[in-house]
Amino acid sequence: MKAPDRLLADVRRGLLAVIVLWLLSREGDMHGYAIRRYILALTGWEPPESTLYDVLKRLERLKLAESYWTRGRQTGSLRKYYRLTSEGREALRAALKELGRLACVIACRGEV
């Protein structure tokens, strides 16, 4: 992988937690596979399964998201769903504010 591609991959991985929190705030409770597919549809990038589940576990440890098991509507099989907590909503607001500030700083400095 070339250096620019590595940098882009790092940026995506770094933003994945924020993207997941944003999706949960916008779409409501979701299971991991749906989150992955939604990210792909929105961005054209599908995060590796292991990376996404590591982020989901971390969000749970930080109490920014919580999970529960329920039966799927179509297959009846158990699925683990994730939902945003109130702490997660606060963290998302702070992260989006900071991302906006950083994007403005970079954009105001002009193009490379």
Image (tube, grey):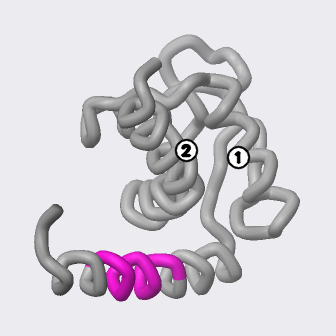
- The reply to whether the magenta stretch includes residue 100 is yes
Q: Position of residue 52 (x, y in %)?
A: 62, 36
Looking at this view, is 99 or 50 the one in front? 99
Q: Which residues are magenta?
A: 95-103
Residue highlighted by disc 1: 56
> Residue 87's image quarter?
bottom right
User: Where 22 sits versus 13, above or below?
Assistant: below
Quadrant in the picture for the C terminus? bottom left
Q: Label 2 neighbourhood size at 10 Å, few (<14), some (14-19), many (20+)?
A: some
Residue highlighted by disc 2: 13
- The reply to whether the magenta stretch includes residue 78 is no
Query: Which residue appears at 53% of the width and 86% of the height?
Result: 94
Sooner in the amino-acid sequence: mark 1 or mark 2: 2
Amino acid type at circle 1 is Leu
Give the number of the disc on residue 77.
none
Q: Position of residue 110 (x, y in %)?
A: 13, 76
Distance of label 1 from label 2 (alpha carbons)? 12 Å
Looking at this view, is 72 or 23 the one in front? 23
Residue farthest toward the left in the current orientation of the protein = 111
> Residue 62's image quarter?
bottom right
